[in-house]
Image (spheres, rainbow, N blue to C red):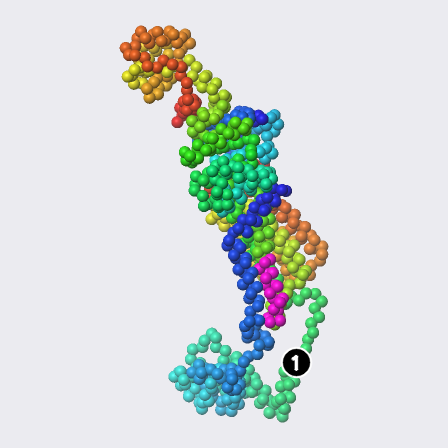
Amino acid sequence: MKLEIKDIKKSFGDKEILKGISFSVESGKALGLLGRNGAGKTTTIRVLMDVFHANSGEILLDGKKFQPRKVQIGYLPEERGLYPKRTVMEQMVYLARLRGVAKQQAVGNAKKWLDRMGMSEYQTVLLEKLSKGNQQKVQLASTLVCDPEIVILDEPFSGLDPVNSQILQEVVRELIADGKIVIFSSHQMSYVEEFCEEVVIINHGEVVLSGNLDEIKREFGKDQLVLSGVELTAQETETFVKEELGSMVEVTGTTKDDVIVRLNERTGRKELLKKIVEAAQFDVEHFETYKPSLNDIFVAKVGEEA
Amino acid sequence: MKKLFTVFQFEVMSYIKNKSFMITTILLAVLLGAATFLPRVFDMSELLGIDNVSEEKPEDGSGEPGESLDEKEKTKLGIVDASGYFQEEMLKEAFWDAEFQFMDSVDALEKAIEGEEVEAGFHVIDDLHYEYYVLNKSIMDENQYVFNSLMSLVHKQVYCAENGLDFATFMEEYEADVNCEEKILGKDGEQNYWYCYALVMVVFIMIVMYGVMIATSVTTEKSNRAIEVLVTSIDSAYLLFGKVFAGAVAAVVQVGLILGAVLIGYSVNHVYWGDKLDMVLNIPSSVLIGFAVFGIGGFLFYAFLYGAMGALASKTEDVNKTSGAVQMVIMIVYFVVMFQLQNPDGIIMKVCSFLPFSSYTAMFVRIGMGSVAFWELAVSAVLLYISIFFSGWLAAKIYRMGTLRYGNPISITKALKDMKNAE
C-alpha cells in the first residue's frame, strides 16, 4: 500500500496555509511530519483526513483517489476527546462501528486493545471516572479499535506521561512491524528518529526537507567533521579552527565540547588531519565524521528564524 | 444507512442512560397518571363543581353549612329596612356565613361600621334602591352582588303583590327551563378550543425543550472534542440526522408516556371527574392524526435547525445565544397562533397553516376548529416535509462547516456566508 500526497494547497480566506505539500509513505513504514507550531502539520493531516478540502492537489492510495472513509484509518487528532458520560466499552464499540466494523468484531477489537493497554478492568467504567493517563490510553485504544491499515497520529506524545509514552512507542513499533502505514506529527524529535524511516519537515506551509532519514542524515553530515581537543572548550577549539584551519574548513556549528566543520572542496580529510597535528598545541580528542541528529537537521532547516 | 442507525442507537442510549431524563419521564407519568385517580379517593366535587358528592350539611340540623361556623367567624352585617321587605331567614339563605343586625337608622348603621361592630351594611330605600355602607372596600367584597339578587327578588314580590299576581306562578314561568339540543354540522369551537390550546402548548414545549437538548448534544461533541474523530469516520449528515431522529424519538416517547398515562387514567376515571376534562382530554382522532403529522413534522423541521445552531457554538453555555433566532421564530408563531385561536378560518391562520415554520401548529388548529379541505392538508403536509428535507440538508452543511470552529459562537449570517464562499 502506498499513500501519496501530491502538491496539496489549502487557503483559509486570503491566507495560504499549505503551499504545495508533497510526500509519500508505504506500508510497514512510519513517516514523521515535523514542523514548528503553525507550520501546517495539522492542516496537512486534516486535509488528508478530509476534514478540510484542499484547494488543489491530490491524494492517492495505490494510485487511486484516496477516500478516508473507505479505508480503515486509525486517527488520533490533535484535539482529543471522547464521551465522558459513556463507558469505555460503549464508546470504543461505537467508534469502531462508525468505521464499519461489525458489532461482534468491534467488541473483540475493543477488548484486545484494552487488554494491550492494561485497561481490561475498566471496560464498564464511565470515561469521566478514569484518571487522565487512563483516558489517554482509552483514546489510543479507540484510535486502533477499527484495526486500521493506516494510522495517523497528530502529536501523539503531547501530554503523555513517561509510562504512556512507553506504551505508545511499543504500539507504534508493533504497527510498523504489522505492515501498517504510520504517519505522525511531533515536536519530539527523539520519537520521530526512533520510528521513522521517512521524514517530512514543513515550514510556512512548504516542505523544506523530505526523504529517507538515514539518507538525509548522511547527506547532511557529508564533508562535515567533529573536532575537539583534550581539555579544550568548544570556543577555544573554534578559535584554533578559525586561526589555523580557516583556509581548509568552515565552522558550521558548535556543541557543548565540540566544533563542527565542513571541508571545503579542495581539502581532504588526510590533509586536514596533518595540518591539525602540525599546528595544534594540544592533544586531539575527536576527529570524526559528523552524524547529525534529527534535531540538528530540524534546527538547521527551520530554526534560524526562531 | 447502517451507520445512521448506529448513531441513532448510540444517541437514543444517551437519553436512556440519562438519569434525569428517565426519572423525569417515569415520575411525571406516574404522578400525573395517579392524579387522574384522585376523585376516586378524595371528594373533589366542590373543586370540580360536580354533583356526585353532595355538600354535607352540619349534623345539628341547622340547615346550612355556614351555621356550623363559630359565631366569631361569621361576618357581621347591618341592615336598615324601614319598609320591612327583608326577614332574617331570607338574609340567612343568601348570606349563609353572615350574621345580620337590624338597625333603626342610617346613623346607627354608620356608627356601627365605624366602631367596627359590623363590617358593612345596607340601607334599603325602596324595592329598587338601596345604599351600601362599608368602611374600607376590599377587592374581594361580593356583598353587593348577593344583595342585588335579593333586591331583585324583593322587587318581583312587590310587583306581583301590586298587580295581583301569584308570586309562585310568576317565578315558575319566569325561571322556566329552556331546552336546547345542539345540532352542530361543522365543528364545536367552544369544546375544541381547549384541546387545541393544550396541543399548541404541548408542541411548543416539545420543540423548545427537545430542540435545545439536541443543540446541546451537538455542542457537547464539539466541547469534548470528540467531533473530529466522528466526522472523519462518518458523513456528518448521518451524525446530525442520527442525533435529530434520536431526539425526536426521545421526545415522542417521553411526551407519549406522560400523555398516555394521563389519557388512560382519565378514560378509566372520567365518570369520577364528571367528564369535566373531556374538553382537554377527549381529543378526536382526526385532530390527533393531524397533530401527529404536523406536530412531528414541525418538530423535525426545528430539530434540524436546532442541531445546526448547536454546531455554531463551542460551549454548551453558548447554545442559547446561537439558537436565539430560531427560538424567536418559534415564539412569534406560538403567539400568532394563540391570538388567532378563536379565528381558525381567518386569513392569518390560513397563511400560517401553509408556511412550513408555522403549519405544524396552525394546521391542526384548523383541523380541530375550522374548515380544511383535503387538498389544503395535502399541500401543507407536502410543503412541510419538503422543508424538513431542506432544513436537514442546510443543518448538515452548517454542522459540517462549524465542526472545527472552536472559540466564540458563530453567527448564522456568517455561517451562511462562509458556506457560500466554501462552495
**Magenta stretch, overall SS:** helix
Q: Residues within 10 Å of mark 1 (few under 14, many from 20)?
A: few
- The C terminus of chain A, quarter of image: top left
Magenta part of the chain: B256-273
Percent x, y of residue A243: 31, 11
Q: Which residue lies under the disc numbered 1? A: B177
Q: Is residue B265 magenta?
A: yes
- The N terminus of chain A, quarter of image: top right
- Residue at the image point whose x is 63% and y is 82% from the top: B175
Q: Would you identify the image quadrant in which residue B274 lies?
A: bottom right
Q: Nearer the viewer, residue A215 or B360?
A: A215
- Residue at the image point whose x is 56% and y is 41% from the top: A107
Q: Nearer the viewer, residue B82 or A80?
A: A80
Horizontal side of B177 relative to A53 (left or right) equals right
- Residue at the image point whose x is 63% and y is 46% from the top: B389
Percent x, y of residue A268: 40, 8
Q: Is residue A118 magenta?
A: no
Instruction: Give amino acid for label 1.
Output: Asp
Percent x, y of residue B106: 44, 87
Q: Secondary structure at mark 1?
A: loop
* Chain holding disc 1: B
Residue B259 against residue B126 in the figure, above or below: above
- Residue at the image point whose x is 46% and y is 89% from the top: B102
Residue B266 against residue A258 in the figure, above or below: below
Whether residue B181 is visible to the viewer of this picture, yes or no, is yes
